[in-house]
């Protein structure tokens, strides 16, 4: 028992904590004496905020000074034995909150897995696992699980009431770590690896005598005998033989192979394989650089002696992944860790399988397809340095790396690295560069079509630049053919949405047992439905956007708010039955192609077809296994997927992307067309790309045809300099939102005037955006263009914050919402 004198000598500590809320400041709490020894920066503590809400918060600062303006409440408990967030991460959070003009609590929400940021409203459920033994649990833990068995789901607040205590987080943490509970809001499907069935001959037929007896026994089943002979021939050329391989080599049907399996001649073995075969050399553990790769590798290292960031500009299939692997090996050899960022979750399997060959269990994977147990486990393994390399999507920049030496940002041009909603609206590439700065690490940016900003920084000598402009081995860049749609229409060579050239190309590819990808960057069946008599267009009731018809549901859908309604056959405006479909999406392309070429096996890859369990995996795996001859898709097909049999790419309408009203339209069109074209002919045979367009002489089309990235870049930077766009100017966008249209306009005008008072003609607008009403909220956009020289961006942001504070203090703007997006591209 402590003496009163000893107790009096104890210090009174106060902790400044980050709450997972969109509040402007951190909040200070008092530490009870008995918890003094458990407190530390980066540790989670349980606090009450508001009248009845309890949260787990992160300790940011410890002092002996109480807050001046309010009396500090006591923290209720300490959750962790060690810091789950280190001081380096807190510096990164501060930078994100400052640079992207959001709240620290919003950064915390984005950074931590749900299990590490529980609140009173967080829902928990029991894990259904009979192998878990409850006999060793405490009475309180048993009581919680008993209540979950009855209720199915409880909030943290419900658990507090059941146990009669406010601090239940340590107990829930213990149950979570032992696998008894999960966080219901984060329960998601696991990212399931692709398995493939391979055939092998039963062991009794392995010797020559066994094979002779087997073939003699099949004299009355010639198809089965052919299948066995074909199998024996294939084993001389390749190791693993799939059912599909055997069918293609022998021409036998599935019935013959099934019969041989039923007889026990063939055994079936499931094996995990890559969904994205790419070039075979990439899937082997040992590989040798070509001379060009060796030079690129050496050049990168030379640049790293002077520069922290290097841009690797390598055309599709040039062997960038091999260079990444050697760079990671080099970082690990020097005792450092590595982060490999990818723009899409789907690509992580491709890279993971390649990297697993080299790095084994040192490799961790982190993305939103993992459930919360897995994400929390990865987080703790990174803290303990169990993972030396992490492959993941943009949220991986928040992981608690201890000694980071290298960050690779693959496909650095992709806008998937940008978080648009909710805050923080960060860009993972730019955040990765600051993260590397904190760790004194190096960043390697890689792309076949670098963003204009990155290439400009490289040309301006801010980044190192290494170029790899030849495909690996014997692979050749594809041949590109342009189809003039108006000219083809005049000659009656257009059949629905397909030119005669494209249809002929599809026929030839399928005849050679090759595959085709058709690109149309619009999902659904019909982009809008219009009355031919009065011009009425069916629109969403919540948003200022036309409804898209989806044949699969036979409904009109809004792609912004999810609203749907029945199809319109009679015009509600004029009463005439003249409603017509305008434009075409991927569903309609599929429908029309089925009519023109009924024997084709057609798949579709878009947001609608990939819904449901493992939707993306299922379609990609089926196409990779040659279950489809043609894959019709939106820009999902351009995200770095590699298919060995694809020889033809068709871009059905290039103009919709080129003519999009946005300053990066030409750059993105060039990038998208080049990336789509890169899916063709990625091995020895040259592929072909057919681009259908109304403007065949457009500069972007010509640049794609000639693979002229430099020409595109020079024209883009010239125009952007003339019209004050990045990389010469920074852009900050402020959206003003309110359910009343006039209130939105009036408030936006007031805010623009407040900003103009200090920033002058750098303020543009307010103007309605392309879609000026979403979810019944009208939108007005104010755009700030800030020059990059002779002005402090921090001072500009301070002026913006001051203007917003004055704006929010005006009671007339009480219900107006403002959304800030820094670098909104």
Image: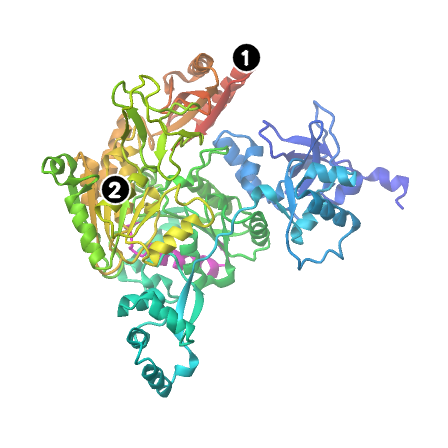
Q: The residue tagged with tag 1: helix, strand or loop?
A: loop
Residue to which mark 1 is pinned: 810
Q: Which mark is residue 367?
A: none
Residues shaded magenta? 314-337
Determine the image quadrant of residue 216. Answer: bottom left
Residue 544, horizontal then vertical, whole percent: 39, 23
Q: Position of residue 364 (x, y in %)?
A: 51, 55
Task: Residue at the far left: name it.
Answer: 491
Q: What's the residue at 28%, 54% (across, down)? A: 629
Magenta region includes residue 700: no
Whether 267 is drawn above or below 723: the answer is below
Q: Is residue 315 magenta?
A: yes
**The C terminus appears in which quarter of the rendering?**
top left
Instruction: Tell me if I can see residue 741 in this picture.
Output: yes
- Quarter where residue 58 is shown: top right
Instruction: Classify residue 24 by image quadrant.
Output: top right
The 10 Å Cα crowd at callout 1, few under 14, some 14 to 19, many 20 or more, is few
Query: Which of the two discs, 2 and 1, sits closer to the camera?
Result: 2
Q: Which mark is residue 592?
A: 2
The mark that comes first in sequence, 2 or 1, is 2
**Vertical position of residue 172 compared to residue 328: above or below:** above
Whether residues under marks 2 and 1 lie with C-beta atoms below 8 angstroms apart, the answer is: no
Left/right placement of residue 584 relative to residue 176 reads: left
């Amino acid at each position: 028992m402590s003496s009163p004198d000893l107790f009096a000598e104890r210090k009174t500590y106060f902790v400044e904590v980050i709450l997972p809320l969109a509040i402007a400041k951190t909040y200070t709490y008092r530490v009870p004496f008995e918890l003094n020894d458990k407190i530390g920066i980066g540790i989670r503590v349980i606090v009450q905020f508001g009248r009845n809400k309890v949260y787990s918060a992160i300790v940011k600062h410890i002092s002996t000074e109480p807050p001046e303006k309010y009396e500090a409440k006591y923290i209720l408990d300490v959750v962790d034995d060690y810091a789950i967030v280190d001081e380096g991460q807190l510096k990164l959070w501060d930078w994100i909150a400052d640079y992207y003009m959001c709240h620290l609590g919003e950064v915390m929400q984005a950074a931590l897995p749900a299990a590490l940021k529980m609140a009173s409203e967080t829902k928990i459920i029991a894990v259904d696992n009979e192998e878990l033994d409850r006999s060793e649990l405490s009475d309180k833990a048993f009581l919680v699980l008993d209540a979950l068995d009855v209720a199915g789901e409880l909030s943290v607040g419900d658990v507090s009431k059941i146990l009669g205590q406010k601090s239940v987080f340590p107990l829930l943490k213990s149950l979570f770590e032992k696998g008894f509970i999960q966080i219901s809001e984060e329960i998601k499907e696991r990212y399931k690896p692709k398995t493939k069935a391979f055939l092998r001959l039963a062991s009794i037929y392995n010797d020559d005598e066994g094979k002779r007896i087997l073939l003699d026994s099949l004299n009355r089943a010639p198809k089965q005998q052919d299948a066995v002979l074909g199998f024996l021939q294939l084993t001389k050329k390749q190791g693993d033989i799939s059912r599909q391989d055997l069918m293609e080599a022998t021409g036998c049907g599935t019935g013959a192979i099934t019969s041989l399996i039923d007889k026990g001649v063939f055994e079936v073995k499931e094996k995990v394989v890559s969904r994205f075969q790419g070039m075979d050399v990439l899937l082997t553990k040992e590989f040798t650089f070509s001379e060009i790769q060796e030079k690129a590798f050496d050049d990168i290292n030379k640049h790293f002696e002077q520069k922290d960031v290097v841009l690797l500009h390598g055309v599709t299939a040039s062997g960038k992944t091999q260079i990444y692997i050697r760079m990671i090996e080099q970082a690990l050899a020097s005792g450092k860790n590595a982060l490999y960022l990818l723009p899409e979750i789907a690509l992580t399997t491709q890279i993971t399988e390649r990297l697993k060959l080299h790095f084994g269990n040192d490799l961790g994977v982190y993305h939103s397809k993992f459930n919360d147990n897995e994400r929390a486990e990865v987080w703790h393994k990174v803290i303990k340095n169990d993972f030396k390399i992490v492959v993941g999507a943009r949220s991986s920049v928040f992981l608690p790396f201890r000694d980071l030496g290298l960050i690779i940002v693959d496909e650095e041009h992709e806008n998937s690295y940008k978080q648009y909603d909710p805050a923080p609206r960060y860009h993972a590439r730019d955040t990765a560069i600051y993260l590397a700065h904190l760790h004194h690490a190096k960043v390697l940016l890689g792309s076949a079509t670098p963003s204009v900003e990155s290439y400009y920084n490289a040309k301006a000598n801010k980044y190192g630049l290494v170029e790899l402009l030849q495909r690996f081995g014997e692979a050749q860049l594809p041949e590109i053919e342009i189809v003039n749609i108006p000219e083809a229409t005049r000659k009656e060579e257009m059949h629905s949405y397909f030119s005669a050239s494209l249809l002929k190309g599809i026929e030839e590819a399928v005849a050679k047992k090759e595959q085709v990808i058709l690109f149309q960057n619009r999902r659904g069946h019909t982009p809008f439905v219009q009355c031919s008599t009065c011009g009425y267009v069916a629109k969403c009731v919540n948003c200022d956007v036309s409804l898209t018809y989806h044949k699969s549901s036979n409904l009109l859908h809004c792609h912004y708010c999810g609203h749907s309604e029945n199809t319109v056959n009679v015009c509600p405006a004029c009463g005439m039955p003249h409603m017509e479909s305008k434009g075409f999406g991927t569903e309609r392309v599929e429908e029309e192609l089925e009519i023109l070429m009924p024997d084709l096996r057609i798949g579709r890859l878009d947001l609608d077809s990939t819904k449901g369990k493992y939707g993306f995996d299922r379609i990609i795996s089926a196409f990779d296994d040659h279950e489809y001859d043609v894959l019709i898709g939106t820009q999902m097909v351009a995200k770095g997927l590699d298919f060995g049999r694809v020889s033809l790419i068709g871009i059905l309408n290039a103009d919709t992307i080129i003519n999009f009203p946005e300053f990066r339209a030409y750059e993105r069109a060039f990038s998208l067309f080049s990336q789509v074209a890169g899916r063709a002919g990625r091995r020895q045979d040259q592929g072909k790309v057919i681009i259908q367009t109304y403007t065949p002489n457009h500069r972007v089309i010509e640049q794609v045809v000639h693979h002229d990235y430099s020409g595109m870049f020079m024209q883009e930077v010239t125009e952007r300099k003339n019209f004050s766009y990045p990389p010469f100017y920074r852009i900050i966008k402020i959206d003003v939102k309110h359910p009343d249209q006039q209130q939105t306009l009036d408030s936006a005008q007031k805010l623009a005037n407040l900003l103009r008072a200090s920033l002058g003609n750098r303020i543009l607008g307010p103007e309605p955006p392309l879609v000026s009403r979403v979810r019944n909220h009208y939108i007005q956009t104010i755009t700030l263009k800030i020059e990059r020289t002779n002005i402090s961006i921090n001072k500009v942001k301070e002026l913006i914050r001051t203007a917003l504070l004055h704006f929010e203090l005006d009671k007339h703007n009480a219900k107006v919402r403002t959304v800030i997006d820094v670098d909104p591209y």
